[in-house]
Image: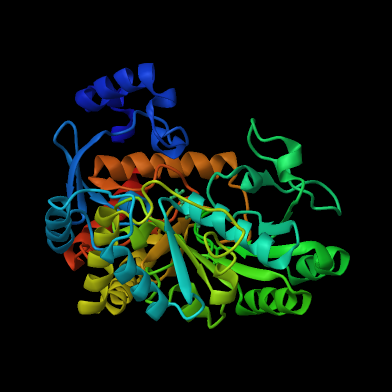
Amino acid sequence: MSNADGPREDRHPRSAELYERACRVIPGGVSSPVRAFRAVGGTPLFIARALGAQVFDADGRSYLDFVGSWGPLIAGHAHPAVIAALTEALTRGTTYGAPCAAEVELAERVVASYPAAEQVRFVSSGTEAVMSAIRVARAFTGCDVIVKFAGCYHGHADHLLVAAGSGLATFGRPSSAGVPEAFTALTRVLPLDDEAAVAALFAREGARIAAVIIEPVPANHGLLPQRPEFLATLRRLTSQHGALLIFDEVISGFRLGRGGAAELTGITPDLVTFGKVIGGGMPVGAFGAARKIMARLAPDGDTYQAGTLSGNPVAMTAGLATLDLLVRESGWQRLEARGAELERLLRPVLAQAPFPLHLVRVGSLFWISFHEAGAPRTAATLTERESVRYAALFHGMLDRGIYLPPSAYEACFLSLAHSTTDLTRFAQALRAALAAIA
Ligand SMILES: *Cc1c(COP(=O)(O)O)cnc(C)c1O
């Protein structure tokens, strides 16, 4: 197959040259590690422009994009309504370091959409949103222990870069160099899908737990939709012990519906974090909760939290334009229909694959699981053989003009810009790429 045609650099000379320059001045040549293609091999493509469902690389090749900048671009790249709103906003200046109307409007939209958030504060990334939510949860409860789940990603704050420890204690160990053990000593890591483990932890340490944080639809280790009973158990145990339940909706918020995963699952958290879609492609995060919790934040309360570019009018405008478009164009219904259509097209292709593949889909999020044993509900690791297969498929799809995430553990994203023609093209390319691997 084309994978063996020779060094990819030959076919992407501009990307190869940019990558070489990048590696001299940027560690690994990238601003975020997954972009480096390490899990699939080859040279990362440098993107020169993007429109709708397509990205165009520096060598002028176009690809149908199923990464969507990892989630924000629910309307597709450079949607005219978003670009028009941004262009107009830019003429009025980019940031004031003072309040502006756009942040009030976006906050009003969020509060109206997400009942658990009576108030919301804006930051500039999902990482910051989670950091701040945890700080306010600790301030509000007066407790210090945080519980997270293996396979859920909550950004790169020190106390969340934690791997499950061995044994009963579930004490987290730092999962990155540069994170002292003392910084993760208050973080506990549990497996997903395991009510008994959560109950045991609460029985042991319930009085110390400030918050349980989870992606209600975990989408950072493949896509691992949880059983409703599991989320219900988290809700019940946190309430019983006076701990807060934090839904990290940085991916799911405003993607799986107006009310995010809370609406989808019918479970209401105490605190919520947003990112990605809420910024419409600009750097925005947010966290929200009931007024009595948010009142702990400075300047009203004693919990410090701040940001130079937080709530800037340009970023707020991109978020507003995106949310307005989703409402105006029945975006969530359309995305669900598009997802269902993709599922119909892919099922027969996957059924005929030369090795076991499983499609997992929630709305406009989907994941082709390469786990031979079936799609997992916990953070299962792929075998070497399964990882090699993904790398082959990734490159086979790239050669056919389809841009998938450069890691088998990343979910794919649909946008309003993906047409029926695009989805058909995807299914046909998948069939051909799988046949070539066989
Ligand atoms: C992307 C992500 C984050 C981190 O957001 P950044 O904007 O990359 O800092 C946090 N939580 C979840 C669930 C995410 O998907």
Q: Which of 190 and 94 is in front in this view?
A: 94
Figure check: 391 above or below 128: above
Q: Residue at x 26, y 56 (%)?
A: 313
Q: How did the renderer colour the structure?
A: rainbow
Which image quarter is the N terminus in? Answer: top left
How many numbered badges does the structure rendering display?
0
Image coordinates of residue 293 in percent, x first then y, are 59, 71
Q: Which of 90 and 240 is in front in this view?
A: 90
Image coordinates of residue 148 in percent, x first then y, are 67, 58
Dividing the picture into quarters, in which one does residue 130 lie? bottom right
Image coordinates of residue 33 in percent, x first then y, are 46, 35
| Residue 251 is at least partly visible in this image | no
Q: Which residue lies furthest to the top in this view?
A: 24
Q: Which residue lies furthest to the bottom in this view?
A: 266
Q: In this view, does 25 lie to the left or right of 199?
A: left
Q: In this view, does 374 lie to the left or right of 99?
A: right
Dividing the picture into quarters, in which one does residue 214 lie? bottom right
Figure check: 343 above or below 56: below
Q: Which of 92 and 256 is in front in this view?
A: 92
Q: In this view, does 101 lie to the left or right of 154?
A: left
| Residue 179 is at least partly visible in this image | yes
Which image quarter is the C terminus in? Answer: top left
Q: Which residue is drawn at 76% across and 67% down?
A: 198
Q: Which residue is drawn at 33% across and 22% down?
A: 22
Q: Residue at x 50, y 56 (%)?
A: 129
Image coordinates of residue 413 in percent, x first then y, are 35, 59
Q: Is residue 257 left or right of residue 237?
A: left
